[in-house]
Image (tube, helix red, strand yellow):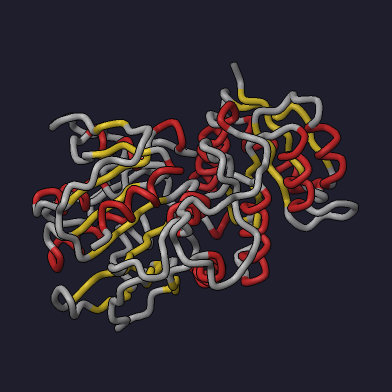
Amino acid sequence: MAIRVLVVDDSSFFRRRVSEILEQDPMLTVVDTAVNGLEAVEKARTGRFDVITMDIEMPVMDGISAVREIMKTTPTPVLMFSSLTHDGAQATLDALDAGAMDFLPKRFEDIARSKEEAMLLLQQRVKAIARRRSFIAPRVEARATTSTAPAARATGSTLASAARPRMGSALATSGRTAGSTLTRSTLASSAASAPAVVGGAAPIERKTVPRRTGKSYQLLAIGTSTGGPVALQKVLTALPANFPHPILLIQHMPGTFTTAFAARLNTLCQITVKEAEDGDALRPGCAYLAPGGRQMLLEGRPGAARLRIIDGNDKVNYKPCVDITFASAAKIYGGKVLAVVLTGMGADGREGARLLKDQGASIWAQDEETCVVYGMPQAVVKAGLASESLPLPLIGEAILNEMSS
């Protein structure tokens, strides 16, 4: 059955352009269009749509308000179109907070090297989030999950804490569509669509926090893509200000967005969250978000490690790339790393997780049920690298339990 789409934009040209692109995929059908947010809310109430594409700035009712109303009445996966500006970043994060599941830059030339590549990316995103419709829950306010943690530094709007997430994500800034990873030898070649090799024991799927293993850790590293903004907020808000280790965050996201995203996380979390800068010394209780469009590596030694932020190889599909940061962590910290792979398309993180696993590090994956897109976590699970497969609401508490001194 074709995926039914509602296209919402005040520009007739853009509505027509998006509709034409989507209709070229036999799995997608544009059932209707709307010229503003209010009309979108009214049409969404019919329940005829599997996905809604939504502009942010529109007359009568803006896209953020429309998403908020849709999530209250007829929760539906929403793909936002955003400008790659500071204001656009703030508005997009607000839209994700309101309930949108994903976003794309409105200027297609910003996301791909060719028209064909941009068309494919849009079609892929719509199909990916459509699969999660049955997992969207009506919007509820998040509550702290760790009763013993200190109070947050600042208050602010928080994202839904339902067991099944229904919003958030950001995209690879390179605009390339394959779910690529890097080989162990070169860390530069695409894994494209090749299936992961199944090996090792299957991870334990948990409904409760796993028992502490007693391993010694010095670093937490988290990689994610589609659905990541919500997932990261859910995980990081569960950690107390005195969390004993530094944290590396690798989220596929444009460079104009990571500054705003880090600032937003910092206001909502008890730990410190900042956009990583070249030369940053790793400190306990601080999370470093890889800047969009660049690569984040480690140099030095455990206890005195620093970050290197570089432009990286243009042949690498993702900037930032989870594989590259994980591989760098393996060289510096060896087996004293807990690496967590959260929701996201493709397989970025698999080969970096393999290097970490070879050093004795622990690898966890988000479970399929709570992922927006079960791509990256599935890749590490199928490769036999993950020892745990955890639902999103448990991951923060599980990390705290496993890594606390």
Q: Is residue 316 above or below residue 267?
A: above
Q: Is residue 258 above or below residue 367?
A: below
Residue 177, position in %: x, y?
Answer: 43, 45
Q: Is residue 57 left or right of residue 359?
A: right
Residue at the (82%, 46%) spot, across then down: 37
Residue at the (13%, 65%) spot, across then down: 331
Residue 97, position in %: x, y?
Answer: 63, 53
Residue at the (31%, 31%) spot, across then down: 205
The residue most toward the front is 148
Q: Is residue 91 left or right of residue 262?
A: right
Looking at the image, which is closer to me, 230 or 225? Answer: 230
Number of marks present in the image shown: 0
Quarter that holds the N terminus: top right
Q: Quadrant of residue 51?
A: top right
Looking at the image, which is closer to me, 298 or 267? Answer: 267
Q: Quadrant of residue 312?
A: bottom left
Looking at the image, which is closer to me, 178 or 152? Answer: 152
**Residue 221 seen by the camera:** yes
Residue 42, position in %: x, y?
Answer: 86, 35
The residue most toward the bottom is 279
The residue most toward the top is 1
Q: Is residue 201 left or right of residue 366?
A: left
**Residue 308 seen by the camera:** no
Quarter that holds the C terminus: bottom left
Q: Is residue 338 above or below residue 192?
A: below
Residue at the (65%, 57%) spot, across then down: 82
